[in-house]
Image (cartoon, helix red, strand yellow):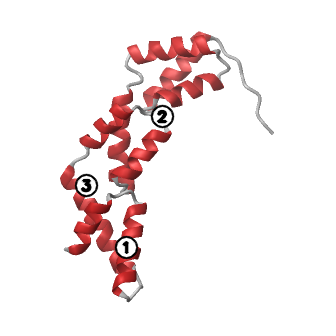
Amino acid sequence: MEKSKKYISNAEAYTKITKWCAYQERAQQEVRDKLYDFGLHKEEVEQLLTRIISEGFVNEERFAISFANGKLNQLGWGRVKISYALKSKRVSDYCIKKALKSLDENKYMQMLEDTYLKRSKMEKEKHPLKRKYKLIAYLSGRGFERDLIEEIIKE
């Protein structure tokens, strides 16, 4: 059963959305979707979105950088997975590139190495080629680049 949309005034929507954006960084599309959930029309949504962007409540570049660093540090995601997640949130390619460049290269390589070592200890497969394949598949699934994975496995 679909819940009915609640219609609220522009002023009320502004108050709610600014509190929501102040709580945590948000992508423009998330904010747009939330405003539509309030029952606002396209013109109202775009006007409010423009206003909160100009007031600094929403900044897509800031969101992308925060998101990328959070996913690397908290979940151990690689650049590929972070990039796909940002694309799914409709973040611009420019902001995605900026976010990926903001990742600390030493921390990134350390995360890849730590993830590899941890998984390697857990991997039960004894056959060297099957073991290597499974480790590559796991690290690729975590979003790390194939060339970096191959480099870390050779060491």
Mark before the other along the chain sequence, 3 or 2 = 2
Residue topped by disc 1: 135
Q: Residues within 10 Å of mark 1 (few under 14, many from 20)?
A: many
Q: Nearer the viewer, mark 1 or mark 3?
A: 1
Label 2 sits on a secondary structure element that is: loop
How far across and down, in percent of the image, does residue 128 sit? 33, 85
From the image, which quarter does the C terminus lie in?
A: bottom left
Up the image or down, 115 lies above or below 20; here it is below
**Label of residue 108 in the image:** 3
Looking at the image, tell me whether mark 1 or mark 3 is earlier in sequence order: 3
Q: Nearer the viewer, mark 3 or mark 2?
A: 2
Compute the Cα span from label 3 to label 2: 24 Å
- Asked whether disc 1 touches disc 2, contact meaning CB atoms under 8 Å apart, the reply is no
Q: Where does residue 118 sit, x and y in percent of width and height? A: 33, 73
Q: Is residue 129 left or right of residue 39?
A: left
Q: Residue at x 59, y 11 (%)?
A: 43
| Residue situated in front as seen by the camera: 132 or 103 | 132
Q: Identify which residue is drawn at 52% across, 31% down.
A: 30
Query: Which amino acid, by three-letter code, is at mark 2?
Result: Arg
Give the position of the N terminus as an image quadrant: top right
Q: Would residue 146 be found to the left or right of residue 50 on screen?
A: left
- Residue 150 picture location, percent across and down: 27, 68
The amino acid at mark 3 is Tyr
Q: Is residue 151 above or below residue 72?
A: below
Which quadrant of the figure has residue 67? top left
Q: Which residue is mark 2?
A: 90
